[in-house]
Amino acid sequence: MTDSKEFQAVPQEEDLTQIERDLKFYPSSTTNPKVLTSNQIEQFNRDGYLRSIRIFNEEDVSVNRQYFDELLETVMAAGGDSYSISTAHIKYGKVYDLLTHPKIVSYVKDLLGDNVIAWGSHFFCKMPHDGKSVSWHQDASYWPLSPSKAVTVWLAVDDADPENANMRFIAGSHHHGHMTYRPSGSHEDNVLNQTIENPEQYGSAVDDSLKAGEISIHSDLLLHGSEANESERRRCGLTLRYCAADVRAGMDWNAKGVIVAGADPSGHWLNPARPEND
């Protein structure tokens, strides 16, 4: 029952029949950011990521974790697993609220511009010793979006560090454009289905260590992945996906897109309402 709609591999030939894809990095051109600093904008453009941005206090962290715990219990009782909760903002009101949270959106707006669409939400929860890794990959390989003006916000539900398999980035790898990948083998126990070999040829690996309630933000072209969690602690994060409003989506993915800043003058994104569940 794993629902991984946000991470279906998109065959290149199928891409071109639906949308001509522009897979190059578009640096942020924001000159007067509201919440980020000019140095942070420069760092994102250079390295492809920002990290350790505090969003929630300890009380909010506890509320978010309790909500996820209850949601995970419900999903697993229905036959899902800890990676099954995908496109969650279409189903669950509280996930919609996190995706559209003004504080999170303000950071994304400083990177993507005035008109911003939020279209994706997927929990990645590594249970202790579950054996699952996330192979080195680029988000853009999985998404029928063009051009590549998109970012992922990774919201830490639990603390994430090297011991419990935090995400890792290859700094600066987004400047290499779209990379060749191979299908992952079953022996890899990959949560997804693509693997990019020899990631260090593209730059240095950096740990994305986060405290619960913090976020990181990375480009859809940044090479990243994570090892299996061999610790006794769970490592859960909620990935929130955003793009500029002038991005176009194939495969009817525009139905997922919520206008969270500015407007969508073209009307391409369908802007679904908040679901009434929970």
Image (cartoon, rainbow, N blue to C red):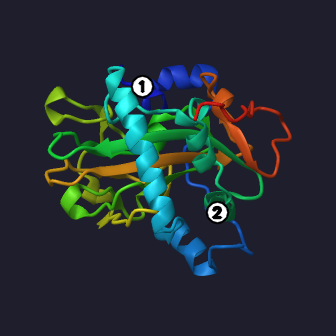
Side (left or right) of 211 relative to 36: left
Quadrant of residue 31 in the image? bottom right
Q: Quadrant of the N terminus?
A: top left
Viewer-closest of 148 and 72: 72
Dot 1, crowdedness within 10 Å: few (<14), some or many (≥20)? some
Dot 2, crowdedness within 10 Å: few (<14), some or many (≥20)? few
Which numbered marker is on residue 249?
A: none
Residue 18 showing in the rendered view? yes
The residue at the point 40 percent across, 50 percent down is 237
Q: What element does badge 2 sit on?
A: helix
Residue bearing mark 1? 3
Measuring from the top left, give residue 239's x and y in whole percent: 47, 47
Q: Amino acid at mark 2?
A: Lys
The residue at the point 13 percent across, 31 percent down is 187
Residue 179 showing in the rendered view? no
Viewer-closest of 19 and 185: 185
Which numbered marker is on residue 103?
A: 2
The residue at the point 66 percent across, 73 percent down is 35
Residue 269 position (above or below residue 233):
above
Measuring from the top left, give residue 257's x and y in whole percent: 67, 36
Q: Amino acid at mark 1?
A: Asp
Q: Quadrant of the C terminus?
A: top right
